[in-house]
Structures are given as structure tokens and as C-alpha cells.
Image (cartoon, rainbow, N blue to C red):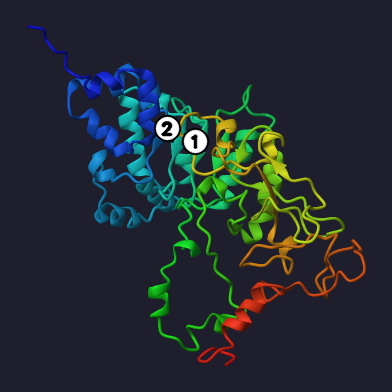
Amino acid sequence: MSSTSLPPTLLDLLNNHLLLSLVVPFLPTASLLSLASTSRAFRSLIYVTHPEYTFRRLDLSPLPFPFVFGHTGSTEALDTVKSDRHNGQIAESVDDYYAAPLRRAFYVLKKKTVLDCVTTLILDGLAVPAALLREILCDDPFNIRILSIREVKNLGHEQLIHILVDLTRPTRPEGPPKLKGLYYFTKMESVALPDLESLDLGSALEQPVGVTNSAGSHLGQRPSSTRKLPQDARWTNGLGNMYHLDEWSVTWAHLLEFCQGIIAFDTVICYHGPGSNFPFQLASVALGDKGCQQCHSAPEDPRIFGQTPTYDLPLLPPPPLFASTVKAAQCPARGEKTKFYARCSDCMSERRCERCNAWWCENCYTPPGRTDQDHVVGPGSNKIKVYMGLCVQSCLVEELYSGAGEGGMWG
């Protein structure tokens, strides 16, 4: 009687380091830690045998810290901190309190000798005070190559800029810093916008019709996008406004120039159009790959992944799954576009439709009344193309017609 062999177990499969490296990036950190707690064999596999695969990419942003890492922060502790009236100690103590969950997590990982295996660290949305961030970037045993701190709390622009300047200064210790890429500007959430193709027209028709519900009644209001894009396609497909920095845009642009070739970011510098008098700042508006609506190009060359120097390309969200390198972070998904244009909001003022993202370059159009451009364009180029944030040829007409019927604003 022949004996039949049992199929391989999950432990057998994960003991193959190739399979392990392909599976682990898709497991939430909480699930990985739960798996390690099921048996000594799994615990040894995750913490001892292959920590370079299991902890290479560590996403702490969705973790329930009190449950997973044993941190029991309470409001009483914060009240005690705030009651401390010693000069110069209140702010530091509050920062220590907010940093306590992450410090606890790092302490546990260091105790298990796996903290130095983490090369991609994601802290999106968490409280990351400046002192803790400096430790992560400068101290041992941290070995972070790609760091994501999008929408973090307790960290200001000025504090982060000082840390990065100190990290990349010419008088820094010999050799480049460990950090190679920083996600900070783009939104941490994926783009989840309604898709027109999947719109339920039946339910849409049941909506009440009136002045406030008519599309034409919102003429002049900031138009909303109706496209649903994967995170890493937001630059190449032209999402529009990627983020808002206001007065910090100029400072950050100079920092990106200072860090060129040392640290890459999830944004790029705006090169402006010919003859513009705008200050040096970041390109916060993604224009896609089609170029100007009229000449289908632009005064500047497009940025092309794989051809443009890495310091002139943004890191694509989310942080890479299988490698902690800038090259991997700047690699579009298979089948996605590789070319795009990007400008600052000043460049695109009165040049871009905020609904369809069509835009006109400086060679083809000068908005009436603009005095910030010395570049002279050809005759007939001053015909108004964008009005109240909408392109006159298409989107504005659509808004007017949609509000012209019975029950609409213009009806």
C-alpha cells in the first residue's frame, strides 16, 4: 500500500525566501505580527530566519498601537504632562508623549534585533515629532532608505526643513545620508473619486431638481474631478492640484534644489514658462502627458520616467513594495504612461480648466490682463480660453446649458 504525501503547509511555502519576499509586502503589519504569535516555528521564521524580507517594508500607519505594541497611553498621562510648568519643558514633554507609541514600537523591534532590517518605513498620518524624526534619520540602528511621512502630525514645515538641511549639509559626516527618498507632499489616501462610466443614471435621475442641485447653479465654484486614478498614475494622467503649500512652496523648492542627487521627493520643481516672472517654487499641478491644448507640447521638455534624471522626477505613491530604492519608487506600473508635464499653480492661473484639466502654454495663449509675462505670443492668442476656472470651449458651455433648463439657475 503506497503512502500518499501531504500537501505542503503554509510554513513550508513561506520558508521559501522567494515566495516569502513576494507575499509579505501584501500583508498588513498587524497580520504579520499575529502570524508570528501563532507558533514558535512561525515566530522563528519571521523574526530570526528571514527578517530581511519580513521587516524590509514596515507600514505602521494603520496599526492599533495599544493592542499590538502594548502601549497604554491615557489622557491622564497627557494631563500630567500639560500640568508641568517648568520653563522649556512643556513642549518637549508633550512631544515625548505623542512620540511614545512609535518609540515603543521601535523599542520592541530593536529588542528583537530586526529594526536594522527596516529599509522602507511608512508613518503616514501618525504623530511624528521633530526629535523622533531626527532619531529615525540620523541614529543607529535605523537604516531607512525610503520614508513616508505624509500628513503626519506634530511636525511643521520649518522643523522638517531644518532636519533635511542638516542631513545634507556639505559638512555632514563622510558619505551620503542613509535616506534616499522622502514621501511628504502627496496625499496619503488613494484617489477615490466617482467614475462617470459606472454612474447609476437611474438613481441620479431620482435626485430632486432645483436651483442648488443644478450643475449650472455652481458656476464659478471650484469644479470637482470625476476621474478615478490609481495612486502611481496621478502625475502622468493629470490629476490637477496634487497638494497645497502656500507660502512654503518657494522655501521647499530651494531645498529640493539643495538636495538634488542626494534625496528624492514625491514632487518636483516648476521650471515656469518663457518670460514668466514667478518665483522659484514647486510644481504642484499635474498636467498629464498631452501637453498644451493647442500645440500639444510645451515650452519645456516633458519629464519622462526612465529618461529624465532621477532628481527631476517625483517618487510615485504608494512607496514601493519590493525594493527600497529611488528607481523602484519612480517606476510607473506596467501599462501606465511614462511622460508628464507639471507646473506650479501660479503658472496655471487662468490657463487651466479645473474640470477637464485642459491647459494652454505661454506660446499659445496670454490671459487678458496678465502682467507677469514678458513673453509675446502670436496674434489672436488673447481670445479668452479659461473663465472662472472652466475652459470656454467645452466645460463652461456645458455648465451654462445644464443650468439653462427648467428648474436650473438660468431657466
At horizontal 30% and vertical 31% (from top left) the residue drawn is 108
Label drawn at residue 336: none
- Residue with the mark numbered 2: 57
Give the structural element (helix, strand or loop) at label 1: loop
In space, the residues marked 1 and 2 are separated at their CA atoms by 9 Å
- Above or below, 159 against 333 in this view is below
- Above or below, 308 against 230 in this view is above
- Mark 2: amino acid: Arg
At horizontal 62% and vertical 44% (from top left) the residue drawn is 337
* Quarter of the figure with the C terminus: bottom right
Crowdedness of circle 2 by 10 Å Cα count: few (<14), some, many (20+)? many
Task: Using residue 123 as the reference point, say whether residue 397 is left or right of it.
Answer: right
- Mark 1: amino acid: Pro
Task: Using residue 297 as the reference point, say whether residue 212 is left or right of it.
Answer: left
At horizontal 25% and vertical 52% (from top left) the residue drawn is 74
- Above or below, 40 against 277 in this view is above
